[in-house]
Image: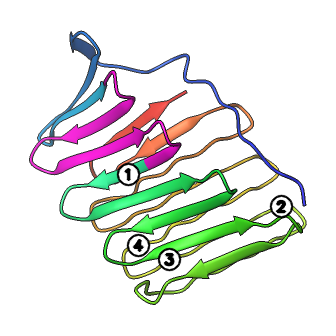
Amino acid sequence: MRSTRFWGSLSEIKQTWLSKPGTLEHTLSDKGTLEHTPTDKGTLEHTLTDKGTLEHTLTDKGTLEHTLTDKGTLEHTLTDKGTLEHTLTDKGTLEHTLTDKGTLEHTLTDKAKGTLEHSLTDKGTLEHTLTDKGTLEHTLTDKGTLEHTLTDKGTLEHTLTDKGTLEHSLTDKGTLEHS
C-alpha cells in the first residue's frame, strides 16, 4: 500500500485589509466580518460575526482541530502508531489504522451515527461519509483533492489540488480562498 501526501502552497492570500498585526479580515456585507487570526500557538481562527467561531488548530502533537461554535469539534489526529483519528464531539471516534502488515483498519465507535463509505477506484478515490452531522469526505483523486464538508452552519471545504490550492468555503456566507 502506498502512502499519499499532499503538498500545497499558501504563499498568496487574497485579502481585504489588515486591521492589526497578524489578523486578516474580510468584510461580508450584511453578514458581518470574517476574521482570520494566526497565533503563536499555531491556531488559525475564522470568526464570522454573530455566527460563532470556526477554529483550525494544528497542535504540537499533530492534531488538526476544526471547532464550530455550538456544533462541537472535529479532530484529525495522526498518532505515532500510524493511526489517523477523526473525532466528532459526542459522536464517537473514527479511526484509520495502517498496521505493520499493510492493513488499513477502520473502526467506528458505538456513539457514531450515520453511514461510513469507503470507495477506492481506479482513479484513487477514497471517500468517507459520516451523515447526520453533515458529510465528511476524503477524496484522493488523480488531481489530489481532499474535501471536508460540514453542513448546518454552511459547508467547510478543504481542497488540495495539483495546483496547490487550499479553499475554505462557507456557503451563503461568502467564499474564502487560500492559494
Q: Position of residue 33 (x, y in %)?
A: 16, 33
The answer to the question of whether label 4 and label 3 lie on touching residues, with beta carbons closer than 8 A, is yes
Mark 3: which secondary structure?
loop
Q: Amino acid at mark 2?
A: Gly
Mark 2: which secondary structure?
loop
> Residue at position x 52%, y 47% from top?
158
Few, some or many C-alpha atoms within 10 Å of disc 4 (few <14, some 14-19, many ≥20)?
A: some
Region of the chain picked out in magenta, as a range: 39-64
Q: Amino acid at mark 1?
A: His
Q: Position of residue 77 (x, y in %)?
A: 53, 54
Front-lying residue, 54 or 91: 91
Instruction: Confirm whether the magenta stretch covers residue 107.
Output: no
Q: How many marks?
A: 4
The numbered mark, 2 or 4, whose residue comes first in the sequence reads 2
The answer to the question of whether label 1 and label 2 lie on touching residues, with beta carbons closer than 8 A, is no
Q: Position of residue 126 (x, y in %)?
A: 73, 66
The numbered mark, 1 or 2, whose residue comes first in the sequence reads 1
> Residue at position x 55%, y 82% from top?
108
Does 3 sit left or right of 85 as displayed?
A: right
Q: Which residue is mark 3?
A: 130
Few, some or many C-alpha atoms within 10 Å of disc 3 (few <14, some 14-19, many ≥20)?
A: many
- Measure the alpha-carbon separation of dots 2 and 3: 20 Å
Position above or below: 89 against 76: below
